[in-house]
Image: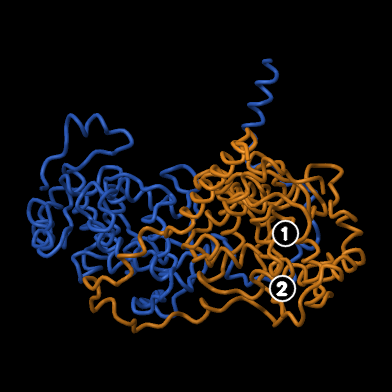
Chain colours: A orange, B blue
Amino acid sequence: MRFTRLHKIVLVLSALAGIAYGTWVAADTQSPDNAGDDLPTLDTIGTRASMQRPHESLPDELTIVPVVKPGEYFVPPKIEDLDDSKYSDEVRLGRNIFINTQEYAKRYVGNGMNCSNCHLQEGRKPHAAPLWAAYPMYPMYRDKSRQVISFQERLQDCFRFSMNGMAPTLDSREIEALTVYAQWLSTGIPVGTIMPGRGFARIDKSEDPSPFNGAVHYKQYCASCHGDNLEGKKFTNREGYMFPPLAGPDSYNKGAGMYKVKTCAGFVKANMPLGKSNVLSDDEALDVCVHIFMQDRPWDPRKGMFMSIFMPVTEG
Amino acid sequence: MKKLVFLFMVGALNIGHAAELPQTEVRVDTHEARASIPTSLTREKAIRQIPAISPGEYFVPPDVGDIPTSKYGDMVKLGRNIFIDTQHYAKRYVGNGLNCSNCHLQEGRKAYAAPLWAAYPMYPEFRNKTRDVVTFEARVQDCFRFSMNGIAPTLDSPEIKAITSYAHWLSTGAPFNKELPGRGFARLGKPRDPTPINGEKLYKESCASCHSLDGQGQKFTNRDGYMFPPLWGKDSFNHGAGMSSVKSCAQFSKANMPLGKGWTLTDMEAWDVCTYIWLQDRPWDPRFGWFFNIFAPPTGGN
């Protein structure tokens, strides 16, 4: 067998791939928080009498989560009630970025989505990952990043994965404004409370989901808005999508939370079809999401560099 | 070309000012609340204070022993360690001899000693000092820069994250955007202009036994840092710190000093003592004092 130029190219390419894979694995396996190993024990020096269990009780009304009736959720303050302080300006900017990311944070966004395409009703709708339920929980340990991350870093992940873009720096105007908007939305919520309506709906699986059923359900329930090819529907008067694309280059990438079938099903169950929440059964939601899962979309930026360059995503 | 540049600049400025709300998004379902929010929970100036049930009772943060055993808990513990022993756990960012808990007494729990549980839920907040809305992390950076006379850790550094986690955990249950009683320092009246002469006398009477006559405080014998912090000299906070403004210092002293005998000084005595402290030599403000820091460094300390 002769050693041709083709062999050489294949060898070089596989060596490169090996190096890239090795770097990724190495970066993956090293502990993300360098402070964790030697410091988790409590310092005893400060355990003084004044630090002992408190005698005084917390006033009752501070801990009550303001849900008026069961099935009713926390209602964040109205945007019209803002005064004209600098804080309120920042809140308004945050809201603008949130509902019109294509204009106000375009430079960080790689696809056609707005934040409010998933966080419905400007981040207010319960079970559509409302901001007011998320903000009080951070800083929080997150399996995905394998360390405790702040709310700002969580926002960065949104930009990186769901918006298929680049993360703004932690001190950028965009991250700051979005944080202020989230903090304002959660006015009155006790810090660290798990609010009803947080995240998405819970899904109980009774059988393995089937993409074939999913395609049928998709045609029946989703295609009228999201299009037959999952391409979504654009606004006519401005940038961005009225009904977001579920696949293709303008959609979230494979690292996004919505790419997980379970997360997607939780969202779909609680919010889709729009205005008819909780109509689909758990299994129907899972079927539809497996159908969506199987479509073409941007690769995961953490490990899809080669593929993103040499096998770019096709039109949705 | 000039037109293009101008357009580009206009576009770049666009991010700076908060633009009008796009009317496209003001839909009925978002601005009509389905359940009304309790009025005591809105951010209005008139009703910002949440009343304590009985006077003298304040928000009580969770117990140290109840820190969860999780990665979050580890971060909280690290944050607490940094907070009470900054000289060991965040030494590389600190330029003087102080710990966070030298001013934030009782590990950041004591009401009217700038407790963390009252500060964390209020941020991001507009701050006159920075003339900007700052996040809690950025506020902690300012502590390092001014009160610790050091270098600000980056926003994603483990130190900032740990302290933020600790503050978040301490304020578990405290509502966002509410001014809790005990926030910051005491409120003071000012009956007359303060005199440092009176302040010096008072200092020698009531403060010098702990902070020593030359204001250098007393060090721990078994570890780094000060048991009683230095009030001036090169191991103290610098001229840019909040404690370097006479008013903040007086408010702090009124509520917390002499240690264990808070609220015993009159308003005027607190002003006098703090004017005396303010007149002493300390590191210069890093925002505009680098020249002085090099050619006229603060004396004292060790």
Mark number displayed over residue B272: none
Residue A82 is left or right of residue B205, and the answer is right
Which part of the image, by quadrant, shows the N terminus of chain A?
top right
Compared to residue B207, the image places residue A88 above or below, namely: above
Residue B212 is left or right of residue B140, and the answer is left
Q: Name the image quarter holding residue B53.
A: bottom left
Q: In percent of the image, x 23 and y 46: which residue is there?
A: B95
Query: Which element type, helix, strand or loop, lies under badge 1?
Result: loop
Give neighbour class at mark 2: few <14, some 14-19, many 20+ (Cα, 10 Å).
Answer: some
Query: Which element type, helix, strand or loop, lies under badge 2?
Result: loop
Residue A22 lies, in percent from the top left, at 49, 51
Give neighbour class at mark 1: few <14, some 14-19, many 20+ (Cα, 10 Å).
Answer: some
Residue A172 lies, in percent from the top left, at 53, 43
Q: Is residue A229 visible?
A: yes
Q: In percent of the image, x 46 and y 72: which residue is there?
A: B172
Q: Name the image quarter holding residue A273.
A: bottom right
Mark number displayed over residue B35: 2
Residue A122 is left or right of residue B43, and the answer is right
Mark closer to the observer (2, 1):
1
Q: Are marks 2 and 1 in contact (CB under 8 Å)?
A: no
**Residue type indicated by callout 2:** Ala
Residue B140 lies, in percent from the top left, at 38, 53
**Residue type indicated by callout 1:** Cys
Residue A85 lies, in percent from the top left, at 57, 48
Compared to residue A216, the image places residue A315 above or below, namely: above
In this view of the protein, which residue sits in the foreground, A31 or B157? A31
Compared to residue A285, the image places residue A245 above or below, namely: above
Residue at mark 2 shares a chain with residue at mark 1: no
Residue holding disc 1: A118
Q: Which residue lies most toward the top here?
A: B1
Q: Which chain does the residue under circle 2 lie in?
A: B
Residue A19 is left or right of residue B13, and the answer is left
